[in-house]
Image (cartoon, rainbow, N blue to C red):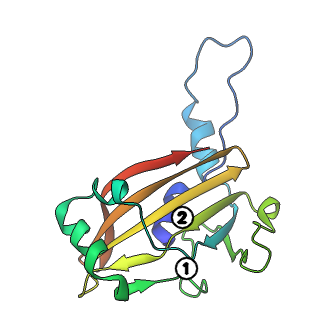
Amino acid sequence: MSKLIDALAYPIPPAPFVDSKDTVIPQRIADSLLNVKMDVGIHPNMYGDFDSSTINLLPDTYKDIMNSNKTNAKIITDIKGIESLRGHHIELVDATQTNELTGFYNVDILFHFSVIIYNSDKTKAVLELGTSKGMLNGSSGILCMEKRNDEWTIVESFGTSIW
């Protein structure tokens, strides 16, 4: 989770200057954006049922995980062990009581994690991950991950929605 947060938590780049014909962000601005420390919220979605059209897009080994290992699913219930190496402040956003994303405006980016479904030896995992930077600025996708040399790597990913 920490690796995903560090890779995806960055501020929205500024728009190009009005008179500029250059649409590329200068390297010094890109570097400074990557150094910004953000307030990151984690909202654990409590569902774990992916629709059949989504499951059909998965590679066969991950389809098997989805179909047979619901007992190896994990819900994120605390953020112990989830730390940003880039220095972001991470907090758990509890939306279970009000059914709203309370506290959403107190974070710079909100991560939505589905239930994480593992294979039997916990070397492969499937999850849905969404990120929101505002009510009309977000996306989600399915991640197929594999543990290699004690480090999780994204093997395959595909988008599921944009808002």
Which circle marks residue 82 in the picture? 1
For badge 1, the amino acid type reads Ile
Give the image quarter of residue 100.
Answer: bottom right
User: Which residue shows up at 51% across the image and 83% down it?
Assistant: 75
Q: Between residues 136 and 10, which one lies in front from this camera angle?
A: 136
Q: Are marks 2 and 1 in contact (CB under 8 Å)?
A: yes
Q: CA distance from mark 2 to mark 1?
A: 9 Å
Q: Residues within 10 Å of mark 2 (few under 14, many from 20)?
A: many
Q: Is residue 54 above or below residue 80?
A: above
The percent coordinates of residue 39 (x first, y second) are 72, 64
Please state the horizontal and vertical placement of residue 139, each as a whole percent of the image: 55, 49
Q: Amino acid at mark 2?
A: Ile
Q: Quadrant of residue 148?
A: bottom left
The residue nearer to you, when weighing 64 against 159, is 64
**Is 54 left or right of 109, judged from the image as shown?**
left
The percent coordinates of residue 105 (x first, y second) are 81, 59
